[in-house]
């Protein structure tokens, strides 16, 4: 039996230049180097990527969905942050 | 939380699913939803992992380099699919070690089809064509299931799976058009894999205990019998096309239904295999547990190497 389990890593892949790295999934690996190698084999067997980031899952701080109210609702009533809030005469073009 | 609060949360939860909203791992969910998903996703992952064994058997004896690279790539995909699904399952708060433990102790099930032996090269054709064909029918609806990580994993799995079925059917085409012995080998493989493939789509609707709940949670979109009919209807013409005969004397086109009628499935055999009495159950678990235990020193060595490197880096930083 193993004495210590391999930690969990999150994998982010850039599918081509010009696009951001996107979360692809996770995997277990002993260290960062192995996480990168495993990510290549698990997530990019068919040219899905040209760049990979791995980060140990325990280093990610996530918001709690139970607090979504106080986190995200304040943005809902701020319609003045959108261009459609402002009234313009019909004659105005290109604005 | 009071019982009423829980009832409220459950009602809201069911409404979200009815609206086709996805559920993500940190969202509140009924305990039964969590448990059902752990069970189904881990069974699915275990099936991918155990599913490598019957085919791994033929990699070294593939008849050409073309067949060998294809089979190797397929088995590697299955490892990948198992890994996507295990990670998705772990988001529900169960560890990889617990999942393996459940497989190795026999507590968790895997697809009973992998408890049949692969005795000839034609079995590689029949597995790709029939077993992966049935799996695709099962899996495509899961791309829209309610649990986000499962749905995302399934999108990847389904995209990769279609090559598996084609490579299998191509093997069958080649053998069916070969020497009389080769054609006979292909027919023999079809004879042995046909009924287990039909069983793979699960017990009949009348016997299936989880169907109603699973439909509600979109873990299932069509019933087992509907999926089975779809499989028969799409596969029979493929057999006809290459001159092979489906081993079912009751198989007949039903003009009225626009579908094939087919014979009675031997459910006793199915339940025997599920309960562990199939031809290869013991062998599969022995190989799987043996690989896990035999690999323990490698996993330990990798961890020891990683911590030594980390310590060295810390020292250099001082």
Image (cartoon, coloured by chain):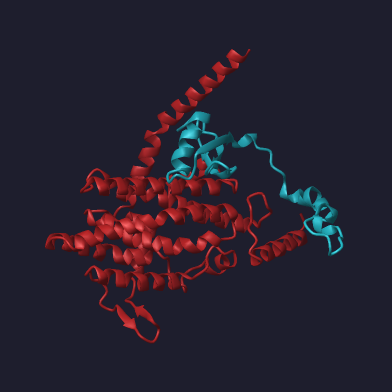
Note the chain letter of the red one: B
**Taking A2 as reference, is A73 left or right?**
right
Instruction: Tell me residue B114's x, y (percent).
Output: 34, 54
Q: Could you tell whether B66 is left or right of B291 in the image?
A: left
Residue at the outermost bottom position: B256
Left or right: B294 with respect to B43?
left
- The quadrant of the rendering that contains the N terminus of chain B is bottom right
Give the chain letter for cyan: A
Which residue is pictured at 46% across the width and 43% down the height? A44
Q: Is residue B144 above or below residue A48?
A: below
Asked if B133 appears above or below B63 in the picture, the reply is: below
Image quadrant containing the C terminus of chain B: top right
Work out whether residue A36 can be spotted: yes
Residue at 58% in and 44% down: A19
Residue B41 lies, in percent from the top left, at: 51, 54
Q: Nearer the viewer, residue B10 or B318?
A: B318
Residue at 50% over, 30% down: A30
């Amino acid at each position: 039996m193993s004495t210590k389990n391999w930690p969990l890593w999150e994998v982010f892949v850039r599918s081509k230049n010009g696009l951001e790295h996107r979360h692809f999934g996770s995997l277990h690996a002993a260290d960062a180097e192995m996480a990168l190698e495993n990510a290549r084999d698990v997530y990019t067997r068919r040219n899905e990527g040209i760049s990979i980031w791995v980060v140990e899952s325990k280093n990610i701080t996530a918001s709690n969905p139970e607090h979504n109210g106080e986190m995200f609702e304040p943005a809902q009533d701020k319609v003045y942050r959108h261009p459609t809030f402002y009234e313009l005469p019909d004659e105005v073009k290109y604005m | 939380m009071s019982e009423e609060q829980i009832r409220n949360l459950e009602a809201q939860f069911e409404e979200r699913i009815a609206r086709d909203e996805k559920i993500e791992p940190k969202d509140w969910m009924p305990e039964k939803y969590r448990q059902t998903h752990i069970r189904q996703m881990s069974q699915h992952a275990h099936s991918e992992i155990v599913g490598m064994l019957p085919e791994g058997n033929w990699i070294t004896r593939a008849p050409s380099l073309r067949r060998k690279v294809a089979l190797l790539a397929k088995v590697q995909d299955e490892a990948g699919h198992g890994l996507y699904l295990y990670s998705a399952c772990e988001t529900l708060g169960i560890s990889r070690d617990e999942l393996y433990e459940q497989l190795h102790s026999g507590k968790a099930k895997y697809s009973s089809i992998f408890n049949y032996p692969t005795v000839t090269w034609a079995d590689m054709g029949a597995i790709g064509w029939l077993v992966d064909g049935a799996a695709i029918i099962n899996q495509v609806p899961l791309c829209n299931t309610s649990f986000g990580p499962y749905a995302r994993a399934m999108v990847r799995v389904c995209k990769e799976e279609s090559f598996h079925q084609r490579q299998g059917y191509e093997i069958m085409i080649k053998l069916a058009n070969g020497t009389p012995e080769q054609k006979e080998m292909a027919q023999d493989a079809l004879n042995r894999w046909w009924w287990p493939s039909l069983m793979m789509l699960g017990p009949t609707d009348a016997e299936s205990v989880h169907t109603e709940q699973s439909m509600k949670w979109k873990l299932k979109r069509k019933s087992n019998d509907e999926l089975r009919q779809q499989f028969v209807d799409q596969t029979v013409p493929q057999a006809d096309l290459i001159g092979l005969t489906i081993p079912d004397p009751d198989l007949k086109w039903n003009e009225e239904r626009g579908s094939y009628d087919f014979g009675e499935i031997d459910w006793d055999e199915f339940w025997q295999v599920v309960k562990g009495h199939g031809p290869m159950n013991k062998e599969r678990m022995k190989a799987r547990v043996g690989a896990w235990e035999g690999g323990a020193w490698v996993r330990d060595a990798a961890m020891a190497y990683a911590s030594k490197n980390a310590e060295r880096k810390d020292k250099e930083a001082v």
